[in-house]
Amino acid sequence: MSEHDPANTVDEADLPAVAEPFTGDNPIVIEGLKNSFGDHVIHEDLSLTVRRGEIIGVVGGSGTGKSVLMRSIIGLQIPDAGTIEVLGSSITDAQDDDDIDIRSRWGVLFQGGALFSTLTVAENVEVPLLEFYPEIDPELRHEIARYKVMLSGLPEEAASKYPAELSGGMKKRAGLARALALDPEVLFLDEPTAGLDPIGAAAFDRLTKELQETLGLTVFLITHDLDTLYEICDRVAVLAEKKVIAVGTIPELLALDHPWIQEYFNGPRGRAAQNSQERGAQAREQGHADSVDNSGEQGA
Amino acid sequence: MRDWADFTTDAEEGGASTIALTGALTVSCIGPLDKRLRELDEPIARIDLSGVSAIDTVGAWTAWRTARDHDAEIVGASEQAERLISAIKDSKGDADIAPPRAEVIERVPAAVGDLVVGWGEGTVGVIGFLGSLVVSAGHTIKKPSKLRVKALIRQIELVGVSALGIIGLMCFLVGIVIAQQGAVQLQQFGAEFYTINLTGRLAMRELGVLMTAIMVAGRSGSAFAAQLGTMKLTEEVDAMRTIGVSPVEALIIPRVLAAVLMMPLLGFYAAVMAIIGGAFLANFALDIPFFTFLARIQEVVPMHDVWVGLVKAPFFGLIIALAGCYQGMQVKANAEEVGIRTTMAVVQAIFMVIVLDAFFAIFFTKVGWG
């Protein structure tokens, strides 16, 4: 029949088996992780458990190994010791790249977007689809690419643009579209709002939250942005002294008497973010009350 | 083996039917289903999602698009399915995924036009580049303290010293080949002793400097283009400009100077290595003792042959460095362009070197250095 018929072009036996969606409570479990570059130890006996469906923010000073932690989880950095399990399968037991068979179930947004510079945005989104699901019709693939571009908050005409033609914020959104290409269960974001203007950053935060709610994602989010932490993170993990020294909601962290945490959240920027979040919450309540009032008037 | 998503058709009176989707409507299981749904041309009234075990945005999109195309109604959608559908349904699904491509009949003349305009702009660009180089060179001559001595020495090491091994080996082998092939032909009329003349003069006049130019273009010309191109991409060149450091003075002058200074030395060295290669072969294959060969070289190779090689070499070095630096500085968009520009730098450099060599051959014959 048509030349794109999967029965003709793709051998059924070649297709990887499809795993059931993860139903456990903890999609990411890290235990006793140790990472070092030469003599320089980055992580020592680091443990962290991420709960399903939460947005976990990872904070820490520059050089505390936040990105290294993310690279370890997604299998780009081989740790010296410790175990990492993502979606129930072990990353650290994998002997080589091919052993990590859950790549189709996570999406990663790198700091600079890391878009393939010779492909358009839509073609970037299609790369994982083509790699993992070659049986999908080109027509459907193009459609998927288009609505993912839209989901990530880009105008549809951005789909045909090359990365070099995009601004920094648009590159991040395009990178997010590619990260979402396969409807992943876990999303890794490395400083998604760094380098964005406050309006763009707030919009990106909202987008992350919306996508997390709509698609039921677990989000592992590295950030320096206190507003992001206050606005969208369910829990925050603090990286210091080569390990995760505390995990919890921001009030829980503030109750701890750790100097770095106190300075981080109670510094001038931390307080500003806290205030703006309170104001935002009040405004939302106000707005909600207004809308109730309005509907009441209309009803009367 | 996968459990592909499937559907059943329930025909009703009036011709409109209900499509009941079953199985997992997820990206991994939807491939064949989507195609079959596209081929449906009967009227559809309802799309029933109540038999769907799992759904993601791809499934939601497929269901929603089918419903849209047939003016059907979606029923039995779970809460999650409805949430997903409302998230994706704003996509019109007709945006271009790549920039529109013109018809061949437009594209070919457009490409030819671009090429011609590109040549014109390239010529202007090269002239502008040469101009800025001359100006910077003038500044440097007026104020020699502006010369980046460290950078120059570093480039001399990269272009010259670290090329010694490969150029020496290559020319040694080429010397063997020339001597051996020459000997085979000259033996036919008992003149194999002239192999020495052949090897010596060829090596000094042409081979040494030409082989060196090709190797330097491949090693250093390409490196210049790739380095400068990457520095352009990472905005290092722009950063230099804003600090007030002229990229031409800091980056290009040391590279050009290094290539111009190193080429004559490398060329002469290459010629010597080729002669040693020839002598080596003659020693074993032609019964001409090694040192007899070398002593004879002094008698049969006129001094002006050495000068021919030495005069040409700096010009070749200049061409190679200019091509590399110019192409590197032209990089604008992306990583692919670095590759294209690097290729162009090497191809242009070698081509120009050979064209110039032909002119030099005629020139030196006319001035009596033949």
Image (tube, rainbow, N blue to C red):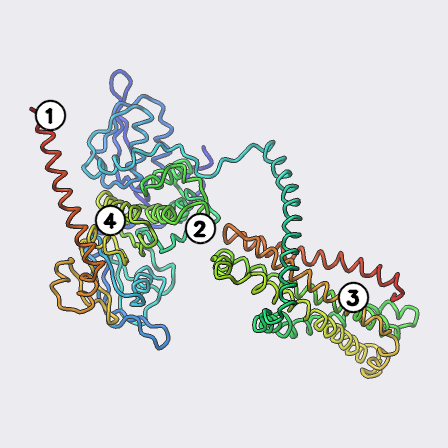
Residues marked 4 and 3, same chain: no
Residue type for callout 4: Leu
Residue type for callout 1: Gln
Chain ID of residue with mark 1: A
4 vs 3, front mark: 3
* Residue B256 horizontal/vertical position (percent): 64, 64
Q: Secondary structure at mark 3?
A: helix
Q: Is residue A111 left or right of residue A33?
A: right
Please name the residue shown 66% across and 66% down the image.
B216
Q: Is residue A73 left or right of residue B171?
A: left
Identify the mark nearer the N-term, 4 or 1.
Answer: 4
4 vs 2, front mark: 2
Residue marked by disc 4 = A217
Residue marked by disc 2 = A116
* B92 to A257, vertically: above or below: above
> Could you give the CA–CA distance between mark 1 and mark 3, rounded to whole angstroms?
96 Å
Within 10 Å of the Cα at label 2, are there few (<14), some (14-19), or many (20+) other Cα atoms? some
Q: Secondary structure at mark 4?
A: loop
Chain ID of residue with mark 4: A
Residue B364 visible somewhere in the drawing: yes
Q: Are marks 1 and 3 in contact (CB under 8 Å)?
A: no
On residue A298, which mark appears? 1
Residue type for callout 2: Phe
* A244 to B272, vertically: above or below: above
Identify the mark nearer the N-term, 4 or 2.
Answer: 2
Q: Is residue A60 left or right of residue B203?
A: left
> Could you give the CA–CA distance between mark 4 and mark 2, rounded to whole angstroms?
25 Å
Residue marked by disc 3 = B206
Please name the residue shown 67% across and 48% down the image.
B123
